[in-house]
Structures are given as C-alpha cells and as structure tokens.
Amino acid sequence: MFRNVAELVELAQSKNKPISEIMIEQEMDFRGSTREEVYNQMKNNLVVMEQAVERGITEDVRSHSGLTGGDAVLLQDYMKSGNSLSGHTMLDAVSKAIATNEVNAAMGTICATPTAGSAGVVPGTLFAIREKVNPTEEQMVRYLFTSGAFGFVVANNASISGAAGGCQAEVGSATGMAAAAIVELMGGTPEQSSHAFAIALKNMLGLVCDPVAGLVEVPCVKRNAMGASNALVAADMSLAGITSRIPCDEVIDAMYKIGQTMPSALRETAQGGLAATPTGRELEAKIFGVSLDRK
Amino acid sequence: MKFRSVFDIIGPVMIGPSSSHTAGAARIGRVARHLFGREPKAITVSLYGSFARTYKGHGTDVALIGGVLDFDTYDERIVNALTIAKEKKIKVRFTEEDAITDHPNTARIHLSDEKGELELVGISIGGGKIEVIELNGFALGLSGNSPAILVVHNDRFGAIAGVSNTLAKHEINIGHMNVSRKEKGKEALMTIEVDQNIPQIVLDEVESLPNIIQVAKISD
C-alpha cells in the first residue's frame, strides 16, 4: 500500500505499470474483489458522471435557491460562435465542469470526486478530452483510478473537506487529481503525473471555502470551472517537460498546514469571504427568509 | 488511514448538493432504519449546528427522511421523500436545536411505531462518510477509520461468541469490539470494527443467529 505520492510513483516505476493499475491492484487487495468487480464499479461511476454532464449541457437546470443554473448551456452556445479566446477543449472542460456542479446544486445525481462540491473538475476535463483524443472506455475508467490514487493520498495525508481545509482541499485536490489523470491518459509518465498534480495544487493553495448562504453553489460552481482550466494547463505544462520545484508530497503537506491555520470563518461556515459580502448576506437572508440583523 | 478505498474518493454516487449535508444525512437516516428493522410510523429529527442552519438549502431534511425510507444516497426518490412519507402517513417532525455539539453536522433521529422505538445520533464527517455516536442512549466509540457493524442483541451467553465465530468463518478480522448493556439480561449492543468490507450475506448470517435482534453496517 502506498502512503504518499513518492511511494505511488516508485511502485508504478518499479512494476513498470501505470498509476491507475497500482490503484486497481490495491483496491482488489483491500476489498478481496476481482479485477472485474472493481473495474465495473468504477465504470458505473463513469456512467453517472457522463449522464450528469449531458444533462447539464443540454437541459435548463436550475437550483432550488435560484442561485445557479444555465451557465453550462450558455458556454456551449458561445463555443459554437468560434470566437472563443481560450480554445475549444478548454471551454468544453469548463462548461462540463459547470454542468456537473449545476446538476449537483439542483439535487440531481452526481458522483462525488472527491466531494460533491468539487464534483465537476474530474469529469469536466475527462469528457472534454474525450472529444479531442477519442479514448477507449478502459482509458476513461483508468482516468478515474488515477484521479482516485492521488485523491487517496491527499485524503489520508491532508484533507478533502472544505470544513477542515478550505476550498483548496476540495476543488484544489480535485484539480490536482484531474491534472495527474490527464497526463496518464495522454501518455505521460507516473512522474509527470505527480508534477502535474503539484503544479495544479500549488496554484490552488490558500483558496478559502466561503459559500454564500452555506450552499454548494456560489462560488463553488465557478471554482470548479477554474479548477478544470487549471488542471488542463498544469497537465500541458508537465507533458511539455516542466517540473515542479517543490515535490508533490510537500505541496500536499503545505496545503494541509495552510488549512490548519485558516480561520474558521473561511472554512465552510458561511461567516467570511464571499458569504459575508453585502450581496452574499442579502442573498442568504432572501433564501432562508430571515432578517439580516440575525446574522 | 481514514480513507481506505478508491471509492471513498471517486464516489459515492449521490443526489446533490452536498456529500456531507445530503449523502451523509441519507446514510444516517438509513442506518437508523436498518437498526429499527421496519418502516416507522413516526420520525422526529433534531438538527444541530450547520445541519440546523442550512438543512433546507442542502436538502438535509429530505435526505434524512429518504434514508429512513431506505433510499440509498443515489436514489432519486430522495428529492420527494417528504411527500412520500406523507403519502405513507408517516408523521415527520423536525426541530432546530441551539445546543452546541462536538461536531457541526449532527442529527438525532427518533423512530417509533406501535411495537417500539429507537433513537440514534449520527454525525456527517465529510465526503459522505458518517459516524453513529449514540444509539438508544448507548454512547458508541467508533473511530470511523474502519468498516463497522452494530449488533443489537439480547444480553445472553453465547451471543457474542456466535457473532465472532461467524465473522471468523468468513475470515473477517475484528480490529476493535465494544459490548455495552444498560441492565443485566436485557437489550445490549455490540459495536464491531473490522479490517475489511463486510458483504451483505455475512450480515444476514449474523442476523439469523440466536439472540440477535438487529444488525446494521455503519460504513464500508
């Protein structure tokens, strides 16, 4: 069993296997299950992700509070104009990340990756890349195992909870997970995956969790959008041969320590940051039907 | 290690919007239902901390009731759980508590019908993982690090041996076990943490043993 990213990469290199394979083998061992059982469970998760993305980019999805919905469709329409600055794959990933989180906010069915609030980044990037490189089903399922392997290290050595470590622990972790998985799918090495994870998470450090009215909507949906774009850039940088000067495990440790010193007002309590802005408070009062002076 | 499976990270499949406030809430409700063993006639839920403050926006209320109706985290009927409960003529009551609890996401669930009642306190600790910290007044010391089962049983000789023998037969190792009772010879509770996931077939076998009243799995 690997305890950190260094061990994960070392295992993959010494066995001459991709990171996804190391994760599959560990899961088989932990559950006492066959490869087929483990693979099929992940395939089911993939199907759920695809359905959420499809729903989000085609239907007019609106949340109960009215705070979020419809933005994934706006972006898909805009992409058709051909005038986008950041390019098709990038905006496709962004809109599909938004799609997932809009479905989530509307109480639709999603797969937490690693949490519900950060569920957009991994599938958003995956289904955008599918359009570009047409991967096999197995490659797509492996994408999720590679993401999971990195998330597993973060969850055990740091945190994937916004209440514990801020948004850097949720969308930050998801972004690193996606970046690492993109690298493997695009033919990069395990070491390049770890650099992509490090580069992605470094740029999410310090991100606070400050949801308006405590709901998983504002700014969570748009943070998933930026997470998806960050993941693509980090993966491209790593595939180009750029390395992280700070090793992956030390970046994860830095994230953990930043989370520990983050004030509680900025850790999913809706007491600080965007939640405490005049507009944030106004929305909160409106949604819950309480007067502002109670806050 | 708190997270042991890749499916703790890529998963659960769930109805949004929050893994802690929705999926975790549904799991707390479902554990209560499994321990009660049948559909209750009345459900009273007391919400504390963040649960009390944001439950409407997160669908924590529908998720808890959905869980009590035996819906899993991904069951779309969760969205309409309050209506379904009403149609089934189940009395549902929510109270928002001001008391400060150790964990911000705490729910106390009371289930009852003409045959009996059950009270359980659960907390949702993130990513959909939950812990049950109290059952019928018994404080439970579950670490949450391992899969665990709760076994409500009659306080009789052989009950504990029967359960441990069954787990041994299926090569399931017990990491931590706690047995508590309120009164000699009355209802008692085993809390068992194990090293690997326990298949349903083993739970069914445990439940069929003499003096075993109810069995529920807390996490996998």
Image (cartoon, coloured by chain):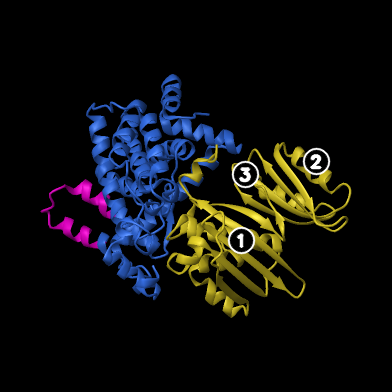
The colour one sees for chain B in the rendered image is yellow
Q: Quadrant of residue A18?
A: top left
User: Does residue A12 lie above or below A196 as drawn?
Assistant: above
- In the rendered structure, which amino acid carries the disc numbered 3? Ser
Disc 2 vs disc 3: which is toward the camera?
3
Extent of the magenta region: A73-96
Residue bearing mark 3: B143
Q: Report the residue that reaches farthest toward the front.
A: A293
- In the rendered structure, which amino acid carries the disc numbered 1? Arg
Q: Report the residue that reaches farthest toward the top.
A: A14
**Residue density around tag 1, few if under 14, some if 14–19, many if 20 or more, within 10 Å:** many
> Does label 2 or label 1 sit earlier along the sequence?
1
Indicate left or right for A119 with B142 as reference.
left
Please state the chain letter of the residue tagged with numbered disc 2 in the rendered image.
Answer: B
Residue bearing mark 1: B30
Residue bearing mark 2: B165
Q: Position of residue B61 (x, y in %)?
A: 52, 68
